[in-house]
Amino acid sequence: MLSTKPRRALIGSAARPPWPAASWRDARFLAAGIPLSLPVWLTLTVPKVSLFLVGVILLGIRLLSAAQRARLRALRGVDVPPLLRPAGSSSGAVTALRTAVSWRQVGYHLVVGPLVALGALAVLWGWGAAVVASTVLGWAWMMPSTSPVADHWAKLDVPLTVGGVLLLAVLPRAVRLLAALDEALAVRMLGPGRTAVLEHRIEEVVESRAGLVDAVDAERRRIERDLHDGAQQRLTSLAMNLGLARRTLKDVPPEAMQVIVEAHEEAQAAIDELRDLVRGLHPAVLEDRGLDAALSGIAARVPLPVRLDVDLAERIAPTVEAVAYFTVSEALTNVAKHARASRVDVSVRTAGGRLRLVVSDDGVGGADAARGTGLTGLRQRTASVDGSLSLLSPVGGPTTITVELPCVL
């Protein structure tokens, strides 16, 4: 019994088209780009309307790019992202043409696209010529034997047929290479450049960071309100009841009175700790009366003289106010703990859309962010809103901390 595998292989090779399906798709992709390059070819071949057509091409560059992206998406499955407009730029055509990305688009539509279209025309013409040449042996015999053309074909029928077959074999590879080149250049020149992508990504990161900072500040405010209106009120009520019991109950045993006294003192201590915790989360005075009053409260609690000079000529975002408040608070705490200073000067100014904080003391100096977490925390806090911190603290003093924050995020 003979095997059927060779017969199946022969039938499969006979049924297989001369061009694979991928080559047909590549040919359709290249052919679809020919009409999009007609304005450029008309510009080169019709000098009378060349200037007009160049203006139309430049003004319609976005439409041409959109059409090319649609061609890539529909026939190649490649999604080329649109241009990323720089932040703060206008939407005019002249402004768009001034960007480097748009000039790369112009280069594609004026140079690369027409050349690829010319190559596509050559491939399509070569395909037709290959089909005709490869069938010369099939139809040359139909010509009259007395015709002078018949003698000419009789000499060329075999070379033309062989050449046509070879061309049919080579054209799929040429189509594939040309389509791949067109796709690569279109993706590189019609899409946003690497610099534009990075700039856009940085803008997104900055916006998301600002949103995160605002969300954290809002959550801190919510926790402060919950503690102030909930746990702190209950502890205050408990302390008042214990204090009333301490003053009015006279006939209880000494042991029971001692328990009441200790509970009253513990409740008062818990209220003080909770009040400090609430103030550390988000002071109510900052929201009610602003940064000036909140910093005055900090200065009043520091165990050394503080000269506070506040001049706020511009409106400050609530999140930036909170960062400024906690920055000054932590800086004054560090001075009270480590600087051995006799006085502290705090200056707060706004100018040119920036909030400038300067905290200086006459202490021993030698502050180093690498040796502790206090200054590192200050730098991280200011950096969270795109601020900057500089430290000047020679050994022997004085120490000056300068912080600059944006007034608006």
Image (cartoon, rainbow, N blue to C red):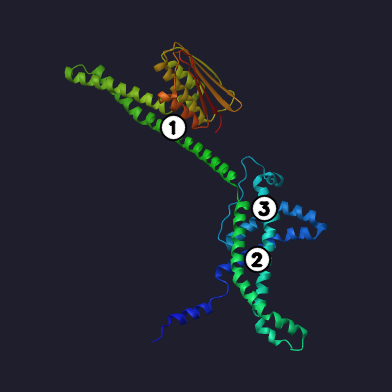
Name the residue beneath numbered marker 2: 31
Q: Residues within 10 Å of mark 1 (few under 14, many from 20)?
A: some
Query: In which quarter of the view is residue 373 placed?
Result: top left
Q: Secondary structure at mark 3?
A: helix
Q: Tell me where residue 25 appears, x and y as whole percent.
A: 58, 67
Mark 3: which amino acid? Arg
The residue identified by callout 3 is 62
Whole-angstrom CA distance, mark 1 to mark 3, is 47 Å
Q: Earlier in the sequence, mark 2 or mark 3?
A: 2
Q: Nearer the viewer, residue 96 or 111?
A: 111
Q: Is residue 116 left or right of residue 209?
A: right
Could you say which is closer to the camera, residue 117 or residue 158? Answer: 158
Q: Are marks 2 and 1 in contact (CB under 8 Å)?
A: no
Q: Position of residue 106 (x, y in %)?
A: 69, 51
Report the side of 111 relative to 25 (left or right): right
Query: Label 2: few (<14), some or many (≥20) within 10 Å?
Result: some
Q: Answer whether labels 2 and 3 touch (C-beta < 8 Å).
A: no
Q: Split into 4 quadrants, where in the image is the N terminus?
A: bottom left
Say if 164 sits above or below 213 in the image: below
The residue depicted at 81 percent of the width and 57 percent of the height is 49
Q: Secondary structure at mark 1?
A: helix
Which mark lies nearer to you, 1 or 3? 3
